[in-house]
Amino acid sequence: MSLVTARPFNFELDPAHAALLIIDMQRDFVEPGGFGESLGNTVEPLQAIVPAIASVLAAWRAMGGLVVHTRESHAPDLSDCPPAKRLRGSPSLRIGDVGPMGRVLVRGEPGNQIVPALAPVAGEVVIDKPGKGAFYATDLQHQLQAHGITQLVVAGVTTEVCVQSTLREANDRGYDCLVLEDGTASYFPAFHAAALAMITAQGAIVGWSATSTELLAGV
Ligand code: TIU
């Protein structure tokens, strides 16, 4: 056990039973020309967190800890993409349309790959997820149980959408979750701050938060 300075109070990290869960750090969200930009967003706030996640990833790998990456993605025939999701709003490109990085949010396309600085290596778990939460319609729960995981250190994008959905799903399944303040980001900085506040309020109602520096001091 090691004590990580965190909010709303210190987090007792159990490295042998903790996984690093990196949510959707794929080109579709982080680079221009992808799904995120198609929704009218600018991607710079998401690019800014890559170095912090990379430093935690390097430490986690050195420690021999389990790393799980997720990608928001759909089958090429879009059979796992509800029309309600594809037809929502007025994006410049819809899910499945051909953009500068291939078909938007479709598995196997260039835009669906995790950014090179955070690319998975052999032995790491990669979860393709059709929803915002990483447990919905995936085998994430099975993977975590098979590895004896009880705690999650969570990074990725976006804080108030896929990160928060996944944290809530994980919390309900009994995991203690620590979200990285500088390893998560939103296209809307105010939403990032609000999501962290919601997660940690009421005595860590959904989880804890800490900076990557605070986490690394305890790893
Ligand atoms: N749009 C947005 O903020 N997020 C997503 O659509 N997916 C994730 O958060 N990964």
Image (tube, grey):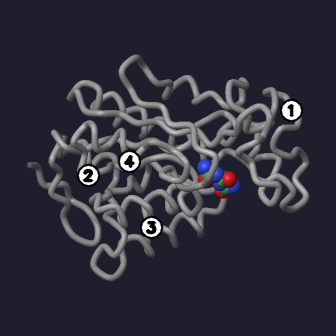
Left or right, residue 100 beside residue 155: right
Q: Nearer the viewer, mark 4 or mark 1?
A: 4
Seen in the picture, residue 7 relative to 103 is either above or below; the reply is: below
> Which amino acid, mark 2?
Gln
Q: Residue furthest top?
A: 122
Query: Residue placed farthest to the front in the image?
Result: 79
Assign a secondary structure to mark 2.
Answer: strand
Three-letter residue code for mark 1: Gly
Q: Which residue is mark 3?
A: 196
Q: CA distance from mark 1 to mark 3?
A: 32 Å
Q: Looking at the rendered structure, which numbered label has been put on residue 151?
A: 2
Disc 4 marks a residue whose amino acid type is Gln
From the viewer's perspective, is 178 left or right of 108? left
- Seen in the picture, residue 18 relative to 133 is either above or below; the reply is above
Q: Which mark is residue 141?
A: 4
Label 4, ligand 1: CB separation under 8 Å: no
Instruction: Give the labeled residue for mark 1.
Output: 99
Point out the image quarter for the C terminus. top left
Q: Nearer the viewer, mark 3 or mark 2?
A: 2
Q: Quadrant of residue 65?
A: top left
Question: Does the numbered disc 3 mark a residue whose Cβ is under 8 Å from ligand 1?
Answer: no
Residue 177 drawn at (x, y percent): 32, 58
